[in-house]
């Protein structure tokens, strides 16, 4: 039996792409393996948001080529954001790669796997004598691996922030049809999934490029929430990543009113300075961002709000950075994901802006953001202590289970055979990263 291994870097969208490709390969007769040393086909699903992710992909490619030079018979494919419209440079640098595929462009890899290319090039050849068209990739849904699953609803991005490579690699925004998404969610529910996360680079942009419905309204994210509410088996819905200007009142009100939708918002602010946001071409002001957060909290006082921050973008002054710290203190986010600016070839910032913030200053600003956010994170986690919370059990091993609350907090507790269940857990201890507890109907405390 032919085997494959997919190594995935980067975001949840990449994870979803890998699962979809895996489903297509399995339809071709391949069998997944945990160790790439046992694979006939190795696929690297790449990320280009940070240089470190690309460096890891290059290192893995070097190791695979070494194995091939030692006489192993394997095929190598690269997909994801590292693969742009033109792959000539990559082809020259890595001539031993058998297939290159842009995000959501599965055909080159399926053609490689099906033996459609010349077997004399050292590929799988006649191991799997099926044609790509037989795989039915367009309607091949990813096989779930647990009670939670990611469902991409809109691909690409139209925002073109100066620092971001995503629009250049994933293309312009393109929404999937409502019925196709709901069919996939039904499939997932039938295969044991209890929670779905709707994905998009800017998920609230969903539907803007679709035709109006018979009632004259255009589909949007709230339309999906309403459709999923009727699907039996799904108990929770999440969504990411948000963008302030696309977050309409209708969408916010739908989150507040739909019982299955978790009141959890991931809204990257990136900077607390209007001048910095303008140079980033983010398309909103601090006041507009703050207004959206205020609207959410007016309807959902207990909503979790997570954000992303980039420090050290070209030209960022001490005053602009201080404005970011002030915003973080003022809003009190549940979680802050912070990263230092990394020049990405092809972006506007790379072409037109000097990376003039020294590395040591970037490091200091990373630490400052983490220090400012820490009290907020500790306060939010401490609020869980002695509370009973609803947890969806996602993992269980040796009698220890873990899952997340509706607000996204990780809780560990003692339980067996409960994966996929919604359980009530009483929290007895908290850390900055997670909580410990026990099932509410049991008196035994969790063992640390």
Image (cartoon, helix red, strand yellow):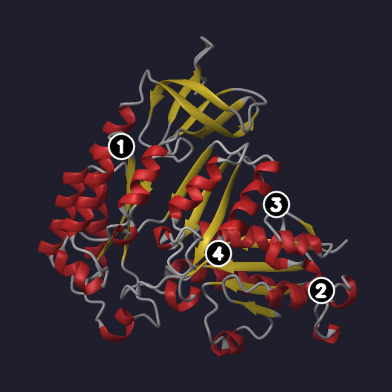
Q: Position of residue 164 (x, y in %)?
A: 37, 72
For marks 2 and 3 on the same chain, the one whose residue lies earlier in the sequence: 2
Find disc 4 in the rendering and name its residue: 176
Mark 3 or mark 4, whichever is nearer to me: 4
Task: State the CA–CA distance, disc 1 to disc 2.
Answer: 51 Å
Q: Earlier in the sequence, mark 1 or mark 3?
A: 3
Q: Which tag, 4 or 1, sits closer to the chain's start?
A: 4
> Cα distance, mark 1 to mark 3?
34 Å
Camera-near label (1 vs 2) is 1
| Above/below status of 165 relative to 331 | below
Among the two numbered marks 1 and 2 on one chain, the one whose residue lies closer to the N terminus: 2
Residue 336 appears anywhere in the view = no
The numbered mark at residue 143 is 3
- Contact check, label 2 and label 3, Cβ < 8 Å: no
* Relative to 406, 99 lies left or right: right
Mark 3 or mark 4: name the one nearer the start of the chain.
3
At 78% from the left edge and 74% from the top edge, which residue is drawn? 132
Separation (CA) of disc 4 from disc 1: 29 Å
State how far apart marks 2 and 4 are (Cα): 27 Å
Q: Do we see residue 35 in this rendering?
A: yes
Q: In the orientation shown, which residue stands out farthest toward the front? A: 215
Kindly report which numbered mark, 1 or 3, lies closer to the viewer in this rendering: 1
Disc on res. 114: 2
Local crowd size for mark 4, using a 10 Å CA cut-off: few (<14), some (14–19), many (≥20): some
* Between 401 and 182, the one nearer to me in the picture: 182
Label for residue 300?
1
């Amino acid at each position: 039996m032919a085997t494959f291994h997919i190594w995935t870097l980067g975001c949840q969208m990449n994870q979803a792409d890998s699962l979809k490709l895996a489903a297509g390969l399995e339809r071709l007769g391949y069998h997944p393996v945990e160790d790439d040393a046992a694979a006939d086909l190795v696929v690297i699903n790449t990320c280009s948001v940070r240089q470190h992710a690309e460096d890891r992909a290059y290192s893995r490619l070097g190791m695979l080529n070494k194995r091939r030079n030692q006489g192993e018979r394997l095929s190598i494919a690269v997909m994801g954001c590292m693969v742009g419209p033109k792959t000539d440079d990559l082809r020259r640098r890595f001539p031993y790669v058998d297939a290159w595929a842009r995000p959501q462009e599965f055909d080159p890899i399926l053609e490689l796997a099906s033996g459609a290319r010349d077997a004399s090039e050292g590929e799988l050849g006649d191991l799997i004598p099926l044609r790509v068209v037989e795989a039915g990739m367009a309607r091949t849904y990813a096989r779930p691996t647990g009670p939670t699953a990611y469902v991409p609803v809109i691909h690409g991005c139209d925002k073109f922030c100066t620092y971001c490579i995503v629009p250049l690699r994933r293309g312009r925004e393109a929404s999937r049809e409502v019925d196709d998404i709901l069919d996939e969610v039904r499939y997932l529910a039938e295969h044991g999934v209890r929670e779905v996360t709707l994905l998009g680079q800017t998920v609230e942009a969903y539907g803007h490029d679709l035709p109006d419905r018979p009632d004259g309204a255009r589909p949007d994210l709230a339309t999906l929430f309403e459709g999923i509410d009727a699907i039996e088996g799904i108990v929770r819905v999440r969504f990411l990543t948000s963008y302030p200007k696309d977050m309409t009142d209708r969408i916010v009100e739908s989150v507040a009113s739909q019982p299955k939708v978790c009141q959890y918002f991931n809204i990257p602010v990136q900077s607390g300075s209007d001048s910095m946001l303008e140079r980033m071409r983010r398309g909103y002001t601090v006041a507009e961002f703050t207004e959206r957060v205020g609207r959410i909290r007016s309807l959902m006082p207990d909503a979790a709000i997570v954000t992303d921050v980039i420090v050290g973008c070209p030209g960022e002054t001490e005053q602009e950075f201080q404005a970011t710290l002030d915003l973080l203190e003022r809003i009190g986010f549940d979680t802050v994901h912070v990263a230092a600016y990394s020049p990405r070839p092809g972006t506007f910032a790379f072409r037109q802006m000097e990376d003039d913030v020294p590395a040591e200053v970037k490091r200091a600003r990373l630490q400052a953001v983490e220090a400012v956010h820490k009290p907020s994170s500790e306060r939010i986690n401490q609020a869980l202590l002695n509370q009973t919370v609803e947890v969806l059990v996602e993992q269980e091993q040796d009698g220890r289970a873990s899952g997340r609350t509706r607000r996204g907090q990780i809780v560990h507790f003692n339980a067996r055979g409960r994966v996929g269940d919604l359980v009530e857990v009483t929290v007895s201890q908290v850390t900055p990263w997670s909580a410990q507890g026990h099932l509410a109907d049991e008196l035994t405390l969790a063992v640390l």
